[in-house]
Image (spheres, helix red, strand yellow):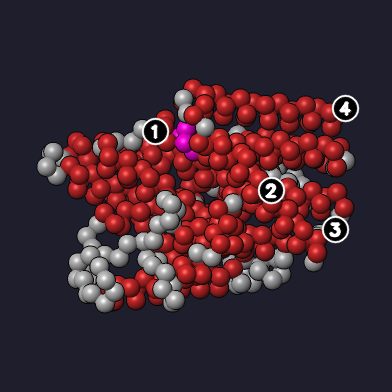
Amino acid sequence: MTEGQPSQTKPLQPVVTGGVRPEIQALRAVAVTLVLLFHLWETRVPSGYIGVDVFFVISGFLITAQLLREVERTGSIRVLDFWARRIRRLLPAAFVVIVVTILAVMIVLPRSMWTPSLIESATSALYVENWASIARHLGLLPWVDYPLPVEHFWTLSVEEQFYLVWPLLMLAGLGIAGAMGDRRTSRRRRFQIIAIVIVSALVLSAVYSVWLTLQHPFHAGRSTPSVVWEFAAGGLLALAPRLPDLQLPRRVEAGLHYAASWGGLALIVGTALVPALPLHPAPDAALPVVGAAMVIWGETRRSWFSPTRYGSLAPVQFVGDVSYGIYLWHQPIYVLVLLSTGTNVRSAGALAVVAVSILLGWLSKRYIEDPFRTSAFWKPLGRTYGFAAGGMLLIAALAAVGIALAGS
């Protein structure tokens, strides 16, 4: 269709380059940048940790969209295959970071500081670090008044627990739809029931999150049930293309998309600059969650007024592409510097942490994440799950040896 031809029915489609939506990569870059700024220049970006909320929305959107496509193709979800893909995508780089961190802790820190960090490393490898953090806060694990090198794995633990449960919920919805519908209406009914499941998860989680935030904000921030609503918001967005279109004129729809993109970015950045968010994750995280959803929904093409025109710049796309590795590496680097020297990195030191994190993030993507994810050797489910179990056991054993040495 040529420019200027009106259309009452054909919806705008998102720009996709090589299977990657550039606005999502740009959103990842924004999210990881906010987290980095929060850790290294907290006074400048006091609520930059809301970058994690943005990541949750992105994950909910992408994973739900992937599962919905499988439902469209096959009418079901192959849960073991889905989990295996998540293992191949996320665990290799994470295991490398944890092992390197364990060795670094035992080399640069005094033995008196080993045990809390090594416990945290083991729970991170098992993807229960969020619950370990809560247990430490309750006094069930050794309490420390300083940050730990892999404490940021609580977010990855929450994500993995979400990945574990979400396809099962959608499968349950498919089962209900199958029991209720006939062959002629089964497709429409499937998506209706899935929508009900997602909305129910969002509402229940949001209500629980508000209650727990009022009682124990720290626990609410790291409890998986109290942040599921953020993933579910992205999931609802993934379901939107399968619902009836608004049927708006093309220019009106384009204006709405542009307004949503810029408005969403403003919500995210504005929230990150707020001095305090006392009711985080609920209801305060609603601002970055809605902002992230607006950005994902809003962008369609790269006109001069489009955020994607600027988000598609090579440096932004690069940071988004390696954002997972940057997130993995940045905290062990700056925390180990802090704990070994007794001082926070500042100025040139902080910039050096950023540079090293980006370099290691790229190396992880290039030499660990991509080769493992695409390797035919690891495609069989037995090898994938064997790798996951073996890696977890190895890291737990390394941590146990270190803890034993610390107490000797």
Q: Nearer the viewer, mark 2 or mark 1?
A: 2
Name the residue located 13 percent from the left edge and 38 percent from the top edge: 183
Q: Nearer the viewer, mark 4 or mark 2?
A: 2
Residues marked 4 and 3 touching at CB (< 8 Å): no
Name the residue located 62 percent from the left edge and 69 percent from the top edge: 276
Q: Is residue 225 above or below residue 255?
A: above
Q: Nearer the viewer, mark 4 or mark 1?
A: 1
Residues marked 1 and 3 touching at CB (< 8 Å): no
Q: Considering the image in quadrants, where does the N terminus appear?
A: bottom left
Q: CA distance from mark 2 to mark 3?
A: 23 Å
* Local secondary structure at mark 1: helix
Question: Dot 1 corresponds to which residue?
Answer: 79
Q: CA distance from mark 4 to mark 3?
A: 29 Å
Disc number for residue 408: 4
Name the residue located 57 percent from the left edge and 29 percent from the top edge: 388
Q: Position of residue 237 (x, y in %)?
A: 36, 57
Determine which quarter of the picture holds residue 372: top right
Disc number for residue 343: 3
* Part of the protein shown in magenta: 83-88
Q: Position of residue 297 (x, y in %)?
A: 38, 63
Question: Dot 2 corresponds to which residue?
Answer: 360
For label 2, count other residues whose C-alpha is less than 10 Å away and answer few (under 14), some (14-19) or many (20+). Answer: some
Disc number for residue 346: none
